[in-house]
Amino acid sequence: MPLPARKSALMTPKPSPGQQAARSGPAAAPDAAVPSPGPVPGPGRRPARLLALGVIAVLLLAVVVTAAYLTLRQRNTTSVSRPSGIPADISTSLANLMLLSPLPRQPAPGFTLTDQAGRTMALSALRGKVVVLEFMDPHCVDICPIVSQEFVDAYRDLGPLAPKVAFIAVNVNQYHAAVADVAAFSREHALTTIPGWHFFTGPVPALQAIWRNYHIDVQAPNPNADILHTSAIYFIDPQGREAFLASPMVDHTQKGAAFLPAGQLTTWGQGIALVARHLAR
């Protein structure tokens, strides 16, 4: 089971000095002597025309300062909301939904495990393909089935490029580490419809070493407790290097059932396919 779904909070920016001036009105300016052919105004009074011009000048200044503030804020928001290195064909909104971030293209930690068909193979055997790697619990009824659906959707979205992409998972349930466990989960969630699907499992010490290497936190207090684990998708390029990292999300009903709106499920599948397609070119 994953951590609760991500949520965001909007904050109202503090007003700039120009905005504060516009709200409180122009400050009173000291009197000055003004040459005039008529009578000199009394103390504390100004000619109406000069007073109007002063008010207009202050208001124009407030408008200019406010416009400059809003422009700078918009630029800062744009630069913060889209990390550098995101492929151009992935929109900022999609990158934010996936919490997609580029990785420094270091070699992905290797491993040798056994998949749902009983085949023992090394990660390096997939060199030359894009690898989409997730960490799953074969007894999970929370986010793992949702990510499974996203993988199936992504495979279909890839079209002709599908043979160049391998979808794989590493088991995070030390109490259900048999091949039969990952095979049953793969069948139940239609992952076997993906030709390049591998749900890897193996001896618990080997699994634990892989969790550490990929920074996956797993909490499994006892066989009857829910497995809490980090949900992360690694995109590995055909040269075997970590290229991108995404963080799957999930929401829950009032009764605790995990779900994701159909539209977001589709969008996630498309996003996974877009990143894989970018690396496969």
Image: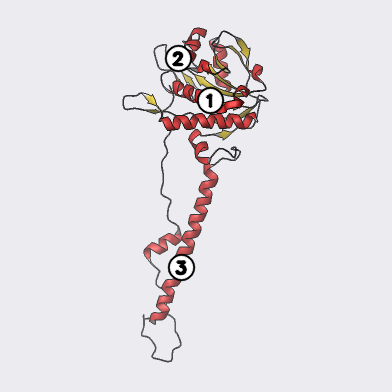
For disc 2, the marked residue is 188
Asked which secondary structure carries label 3, the reply is helix
For disc 3, the marked residue is 60
Quarter of the image for residue 225 reads top left
Asked which secondary structure carries label 1, the reply is helix
Along the horizontal axis of the image, is 105 left or right of 187? right
Quarter of the image for residue 140 reads top left
The kind of residue tagged 2 is Glu
Camera-nearest residue between 93 and 48: 93
Please, is residue 152 above or below residue 122 in the view? below
Q: Residue at x 48, y 35 (%)?
A: 97
Q: Earlier in the sequence, mark 3 or mark 1?
A: 3
The number of numbered badges drawn on the structure is 3
Q: Earlier in the sequence, mark 2 or mark 3?
A: 3
In the rendered image, residue 34, in percent from the top left (x then y), is placed at: 45, 85
- Looking at the rendered structure, which numbered label has been put on residue 156? 1
Q: From mark 1 to mark 2, how far is it between C-alphas? A: 18 Å
